[in-house]
Image (cartoon, grey):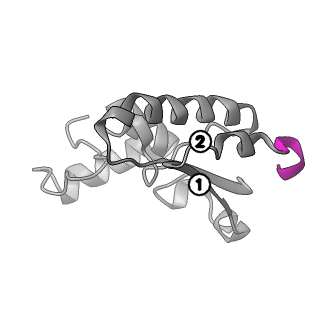
């Protein structure tokens, strides 16, 4: 991936309030079948988190735009997999949660109905027991 991306992220480092973090993903996750754990994302050699933090409300639009442009620039190198740990701008979307859990979502809804039918644990990217 590093050779394919080249210096692409460098042009994004000029914004002082924004950054990115790339992490190498250990292949230990790949030893577990996707249907044996909640998260099904397997096989990705890297994880990229795009961060944009600021204090000045005047910088809001520019920082959000920066994150979106960086995201689009990295898309060709992405598997398209999502993580509930890095929700980005879709954090309140039920579609985001479904996409993040993929084929495991139905099984997780069944578990949520059984163990948390009143949705007590809902302050997160939530699996709704009523889905």
Snapshot quadrant of residue 77? top right
Q: Nearer the viewer, mark 2 or mark 1?
A: 2
Q: Percent from the top left, x then y, of residue 109? A: 31, 45
Q: Percent from the top left, x then y, of residue 71? A: 60, 35
Residue 74, compared with residue 24, is above or below; it is: above
The magenta region covers: 1-6
Q: Percent from the top left, x then y, of residue 76? A: 74, 31
Q: Does dot 1 land on a helix, a strand or a loop?
A: helix
Give the camera-side residue of 94 and 129: 94
Residue 14, compared with residue 116, is above or below; it is: above
Residue 114 on the magenta span: no
Q: Percent from the top left, x then y, of residue 103? A: 51, 41
At a point 60% along the width and 51% down the height, the residue shown is 20
How far apart marks 2 and 1 lie (CA) works out to: 13 Å
Q: Chief secondary structure of the magenta span?
A: helix
**Residue 63 in the figure: left or right of residue 8:** left
Specify the farthest residue to the right: 3
Tell me if I can see residue 19 in this picture. yes
**Residue 65 in the figure: left or right of residue 123:** right
Q: Label 1: which residue?
A: 34
Classify 10 Å Cα crowding around label 1: few (below 14), some (14-19), many (20 and above): some
Q: Label 2: which residue?
A: 81
Give the camera-side residue of 116 and 16: 16
Tell me if I can see residue 41 in this picture. no
At a point 72% along the width and 67% down the height, the residue shown is 27
Give the camera-side residue of 43 and 55: 55
């Amino acid at each position: 991936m590093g050779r394919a991306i080249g210096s692409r992220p460098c042009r994004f480092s000029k914004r002082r309030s924004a950054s990115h973090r790339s992490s190498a993903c250990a292949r230990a996750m790949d030893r577990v079948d996707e249907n044996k754990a909640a998260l099904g994302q397997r096989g990705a050699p890297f994880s990229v988190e795009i961060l944009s933090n600021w204090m000045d409300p005047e910088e809001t639009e520019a920082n959000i735009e920066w994150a979106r442009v960086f995201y689009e620039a990295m898309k060709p190198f992405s598997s398209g997999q999502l993580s509930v740990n890095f929700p980005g701008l879709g954090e309140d979307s039920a579609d985001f949660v479904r996409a993040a859990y993929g084929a495991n979502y139905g099984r997780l809804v069944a578990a949520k109905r059984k163990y948390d039918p009143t949705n007590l644990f809902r302050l997160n990217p939530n699996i709704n027991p009523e889905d």
